[in-house]
Image (cartoon, helix red, strand yellow):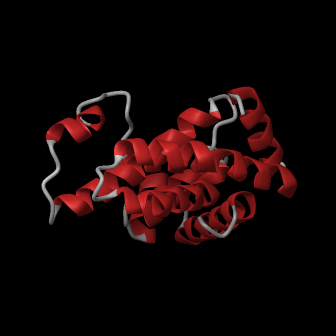
Amino acid sequence: MDEKQLHGLMTASLAGDASAYRRLLGALTPPLRSYFRRRLHADLTNHAEDLVQETLLAIHSRRMTFDPSQPVTVWVYAIARYKLIDLLRQARKGTHIPIDDIAEFIGDPSIETEDAMAKRDVDTMLGTLPDHTAAAIRNVRLEGRSVAETAMATGLSAASVKIAVHRGIKALKKRFGEEV
């Protein structure tokens, strides 16, 4: 299946089309399986199917962060790459893995770190909220500041900060699901 078809299935699934979502996951499974099998040593190939399933689960849990202006395959293979790197890190603890086998993952500035992806996802979600609400959530929930500190910094009352955080989280859960 080509990028255009995958993109169509992804956008349809984000719009609530369960059939398109099943077809998307079904279409992604064989290329992901091949991707992992080509990159795993003989002693790790038994993990390929686990990595496929973990990747599909990650796609499911992060699907609301997909940017429809971007290619689906880039997004999917970025997730797959992180799952593979995680496995290689775990395997590295007890097994020697030649650097040539992971060289394609090291030092490539085009590969986002998981922290960078998470920050981008959070920024995207908070960007859907009014500025004062996003600032309140960022200060209280993400940076760990107290309600009083946030109130002083933003010029809002403590009650307003609490209400903004509560309503903002509620809006994010409604918009992006319970995973928020």
Q: Can residue 138 be seen from the camera position used here?
A: yes
Image vertical order of residue 56 relative to residue 162, above or below: above
The residue under the point 65% across, 61% down is: 168
Tell which of 109 and 121 is nearer to you. Answer: 109
Closer-to-camera residue (100/56): 100
> Is 110 situated left or right of 20 in this image?
left
User: Residue 177: x percent and y percent?
Assistant: 69, 64
Q: Where residue 148 sits: x, y (%)?
A: 42, 69
Which residue appears at 74% of the width and 27% of the height?
Answer: 4
- Residue under the image location 48 percent in, 47 percent down: 79
- Locate the N terminus and report the quarter of the image it occupies: top right
Q: Left or right: 89 with respect to 149?
A: left
Count of all numbered marks drawn on residues in the image = 0
| Residue pictured at 44% horizontal, 47% vertical | 36
- Kindly tell me whether residue 17 is visible in this rendering: no
User: Height in image: 141 above or below 21?
Assistant: below
54 displayed left or right of 143: right
Where is the C terminus found, in terms of image quarters?
Answer: bottom right
Q: Position of residue 155 (x, y in %)?
A: 50, 55
- Measured from the top left, where is residue 20 in percent x and y? 83, 49
> Which of the two residues, 64 or 142, is positioned nearer the viewer here?
64
